[in-house]
Image: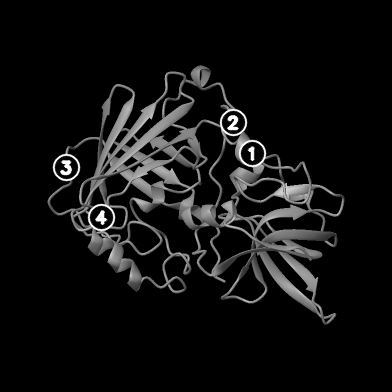
């Protein structure tokens, strides 16, 4: 078995985007192999059950989880039918220090010699070539003729999490508060639906649906639905706070501007940075001229968390994706 130490792209990406906390996985990348027993083709991450024979000759049942969701695997040309139960498979990944027989994996080698990339930005590990999307091939072009369809923003948008830019001027108090965060017992580990603005910083697709006076933002993440009120400038006086808050929107040319307040979700991220109920968010969704790209800018104002407004930017592409059911599992 080959083992090496790495400050790997696997771990850095996992911390940012995975639904579970990855603090209980080591930085040591190892290989394990065994018999494929089950394929878990679900969101938020595909996984595998494998029988591994240990050094004592005993068979142990292991759980292996990748970082790709169903949409990412499909765009990479990998479908569930590619795997055969009973075949010998090998994985490269990092072991959990919390759960026995659990590995976060980036690469998988099938019995026929095919290597599968199980994350959105990994490179071949076992061979020179692999099936999947490497870091050099992430910015794929549009998969639909968006101009001909002429649907504007009202379609499913696919996010790659590449090209993200952020400026988060955290206060000293916000940083210090992270010391109280429990990496084992938290909303992500319990598979609890998240709130704003966290749900806009994930790799899962979402869809805008036009309901006239309201626009629904349907997120694949936890099957959440945000309502954007287009017929008012501010929340009603009696509007209750909620994890997703109360959003009002307006159009400026090809840009949808959304202002969200009344948010009672207590976390800015998944590493324990708090936010207050005074937080306000300004979002700008700007459609490209060819209707194939949606640029996003989020400005967060919260004096308890930031010394000045925080800014986050990314984009989504029209890739012909669909919204899949979310099946977060507590392990």
Q: Quadrant of the N terminus?
A: bottom right
Do tag 1 and tag 3 residues touch (Cβ < 8 Å)?
Answer: no
Question: Residue at the spot x=56%, y=21% of the render?
Answer: 145
Q: Quadrant of the C terminus?
A: bottom right
How packed mark 2 is, by other alpha carbons closer than 10 Å (few <14, some 14-19, many 20 or more), is few
Give the residue number, with chain letter if any, for mark 4: 263
C-alpha separation, residue under disc 1 versus residue under disc 2: 9 Å
C-alpha separation, residue under disc 1 versus residue under disc 3: 39 Å
C-alpha separation, residue under disc 3 versus residue under disc 4: 14 Å
Q: Is residue 119 visible?
A: yes
Give the residue number, with chain letter if any, for mark 2: 140
Do tag 3 and tag 4 residues touch (Cβ < 8 Å)?
Answer: no
- Name which of mark 1 and mark 2 comes first in the sequence: 1
Q: Is residue 235 left or right of residue 293?
A: left
Q: Residue pushed farthest right?
A: 112
Q: Is residue 55 above or below residue 208?
A: below
Q: Is residue 166 left or right of residue 327?
A: left
Q: Tag on residue 75? A: 1
In what element is the residue under mark 1?
A: helix
- Name which of mark 3 and mark 4 comes first in the sequence: 3
The quadrant where residue 33 appears: bottom right
Q: Is residue 151 left or right of residue 216?
A: right
How packed mark 1 is, by other alpha carbons closer than 10 Å (few <14, some 14-19, many 20 or more), is some
- Residue situated in front as seen by the camera: 76 or 14: 14
Give the residue number, with chain letter if any, for mark 3: 234
Q: Is residue 289 above or below residue 50?
A: above
**Camera-nearest label, 2 or 3:** 2
In what element is the residue under mark 4?
A: loop
């Amino acid at each position: 078995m080959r083992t090496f130490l790495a400050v790997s792209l696997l771990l850095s990406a996992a911390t940012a985007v995975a639904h579970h906390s990855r603090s209980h996985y080591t930085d040591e990348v190892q290989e394990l192999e065994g018999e494929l027993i089950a394929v878990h083709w679900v969101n938020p991450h595909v996984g595998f059950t494998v029988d591994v024979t240990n050094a004592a000759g005993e068979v142990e049942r292991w759980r292996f989880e990748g970082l790709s969701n169903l949409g990412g695997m499909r765009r990479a040309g990998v479908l569930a039918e590619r795997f055969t139960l009973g075949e010998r498979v090998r994985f490269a990944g990092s072991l959990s220090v919390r759960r026995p027989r659990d590995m976060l994996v980036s690469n998988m080698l099938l019995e026929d010699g095919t290597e599968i990339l199980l994350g959105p930005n990994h490179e071949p590990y076992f061979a020179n070539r692999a099936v999947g999307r490497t870091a050099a091939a992430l910015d794929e072009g549009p998969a639909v003729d968006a101009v001909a369809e002429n649907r504007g923003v009202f379609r499913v948008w696919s996010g790659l999490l590449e090209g993200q830019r952020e400026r988060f001027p955290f206060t000293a108090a916000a940083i210090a508060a992270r010391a109280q965060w429990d990496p084992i017992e938290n909303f992500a580990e319990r598979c609890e639906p998240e709130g704003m603005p966290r749900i806009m910083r994930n790799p899962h697709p979402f869809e805008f649906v036009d309901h006239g006076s309201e626009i629904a933002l349907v997120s694949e993440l936890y099957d959440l639905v945000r309502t954007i009120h287009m017929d008012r400038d501010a929340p009603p006086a009696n509007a209750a706070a909620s994890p997703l808050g109360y959003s009002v929107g307006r159009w400026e040319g090809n840009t949808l501007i959304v202002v969200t307040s009344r948010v009672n979700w207590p976390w800015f991220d998944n590493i324990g940075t708090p936010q207050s109920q005074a937080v306000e968010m300004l979002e700008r969704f700007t459609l490209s001229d060819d209707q194939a790209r949606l640029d996003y800018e989020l400005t967060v104002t919260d004096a308890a968390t930031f010394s000045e407004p925080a800014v986050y930017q990314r984009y989504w592409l029209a890739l012909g994706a669909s919204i899949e059911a979310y099946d977060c599992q507590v392990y």
